[in-house]
Amino acid sequence: MKRFIGWLLIIVSLSAQALSGTKQEHIEALYDTYRAQYLAPFSTEKQVEKLSKTQKALAQYLQRPTLSAPVREMVLYLKHLFCQTQSLLTGNYCENNYRPTSPLTTNKDQLSLAQTRVLLIQEHTKRRIERNLSALAESETLDIIAQDYAEKLCQVGEITHTLNGSTLEQRYEIGQYDYIWWWENLGLWQENIMELLDQLTTSIHHRENMYQKEFREIGIGQCDTIWVLNYGSR
């Protein structure tokens, strides 16, 4: 693992440009490789142990006085991804202070559903635009579909894309959303909008949905600790 961390840092340090959407994609690709090779084959307990060691190694690297600002930004982002992954595995909030306090880090219970939707779409769109992708517009139809499904998931207390045998295509058809492209991201236990988007980013499949270039609209459902993000274009 030490050799791999060293390799990661060398690749990161080769760039002198500030962290951008494109650079974030580069760091995420490194993260995906690390997770597949050094985390996935091991038990949850071992993964948490490895993540702790990795974050400590990155923290030590960040103490170098000669570190340039662009490289520092990229290492901080990589460390942030590891922290979010550890949070998902342990259920403990990631306290690495990578994101500044803002309405996006406000506890979900302190926001109305309407406020949550506005803030989430703004931040989600911001991240897409940084990657040269289109903005996401709120769809009232998708909002209704997402909220209805979130409440049904709450009732049974589980996360699944196929509750009681239903499919996403069926839910869109019943909700009368005439789609060309569609998909769904689910979240569980995230306390705020920023945590939700950051933890979805740590999953390559959820991240692909977040940055699918064909998507133009989004609907958001939120019930207790469950989040439903429905994407589409028509």
Image: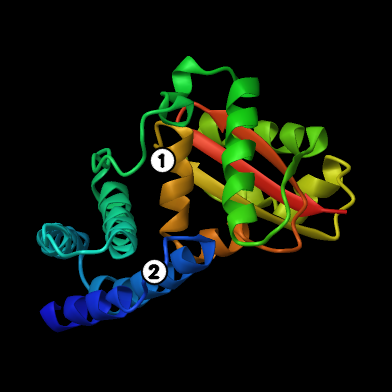
3 lies above or below 186: below
Closer to us: 47 or 161: 47
Q: Is residue 58 left or right of residue 71?
A: left
Q: Amino acid at mark 2?
A: Ile
Closer to us: 119 or 176: 119
Tell me where residue 223 appears, x and y as whole percent: 54, 28
Closer to us: 109 or 103: 103
Q: Is residue 4 left or right of residue 111?
A: left
Q: Which residue is the site of mark 2?
A: 27
Task: Judge the density around disc 2: few (<14), some (14-19), many (≥20) Cα neighbours within 10 Å.
Answer: many
Task: Please tell me which of labels 2 and 1 falls first in the chain.
Answer: 2
Tell me where residue 103 appears, x and y as whole percent: 47, 25
Q: Amino acid at mark 1?
A: Glu
Closer to us: 148 or 10: 10
Q: Quadrant of the C terminus?
A: bottom right
Please tell me which residue is depicted at 27% across the width and 59% down the height of the picture.
Answer: 72
Residue 145 sits in quarter: top right
Q: Which residue is the site of mark 1?
A: 195
